[in-house]
Image (cartoon, helix red, strand yellow):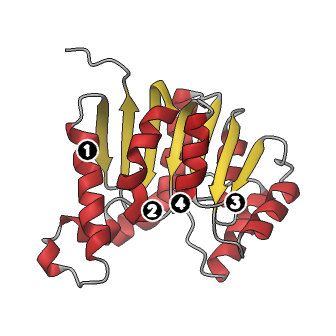
Amino acid sequence: MSQSRVREYLESLVRYNSDICETIRERALEDEVPIIRRDTESFLKTVLAMKRPKTILEVGTAVGYSAIVMAESCKAQITTIEKYEKRIPIAKSNFLAAGKEKQIHFLTGDAAEVLSDLVNKKEKYDFIFMDAAKAQYFIWLPMIRQLLSDGGILFSDNVLQDGTVAESRFGISRRPRSIHTRMRDYLYALTHDEHWTTSILEVGDGVSLSVWHDEVWR
């Protein structure tokens, strides 16, 4: 059986979100806004159900779809960060339409600056969802470490980059080569630092699921 047929079958089993959330999804797809894939979304909901976080940080709001999905899936207070000015008012409008404006705290600006500010404020999160500029994942990782509580989960989306992350860097065209290199560095750090316990899964465009430990057990 082909992988596409398997994917179609699995997507047919997905339990959809609220009507407003589905409307936001459809509009985002029409406007070609990158949003979380269905299978990744289902996996994200399952992890949230297992972890039951009280606080969530999302890096990369886009139009707010994934933040609303998380808000509909758990009672956590969610902080989300977005830089792209054209998407900020759309996300705000979507949070209001979904009735989640009190549950979702929206921060705007460059993610590196916002993350640094959160570190300085000694904020801690039980769950961090990374879905922003892929070349920056590795750059932000030291701050992400400081923001995660002990036993906290880092859920990173799009880490396989349509499979290109497995290719030799010499087989990658010059423009995306830095993204390729940094993503490989990111995945290496998550799998070789003993403070992390990480699995990389072929869900959607690749998900790395990492648990942070303040102390190394061995």
Query: In front here: 167 or 106?
Result: 106
Q: Mark 2 points at which residue?
A: 9
In the image, what residue occupies the spot 69% across and 66% down?
63
Residue 79: % across, % down: 67, 44
Q: Eyeballing the image, is 181 above or below 113?
A: below
Q: Nearer the viewer, mark 1 or mark 3?
A: 1
Q: Mark 4 points at which residue?
A: 38
Mark toward the start of the polypeptide (1 vs 4): 4
Badge 2: residue crowd in 10 Å (few <14, some 14–19, many ≥20) = few
Residue 158: % across, % down: 40, 61
The answer to whether 184 appears left or right of 90 in the picture is left
* Element marked by disc 4: helix
Which circle marks residue 189 in the picture? 1
Q: Is residue 1 among the parts visible in the rendering?
A: no
Quarter of the image with the C terminus in it: top left
Q: Nearer the viewer, mark 1 or mark 2?
A: 1
Which circle marks residue 91 in the picture? none
Q: Mark 3 points at which residue?
A: 64
Would you say the residues marked 1 and 3 are in contact, meaning their CB atoms lie under 8 Å apart? Answer: no
Residue 45: % across, % down: 56, 43
Residue 216 figure quarter: top left
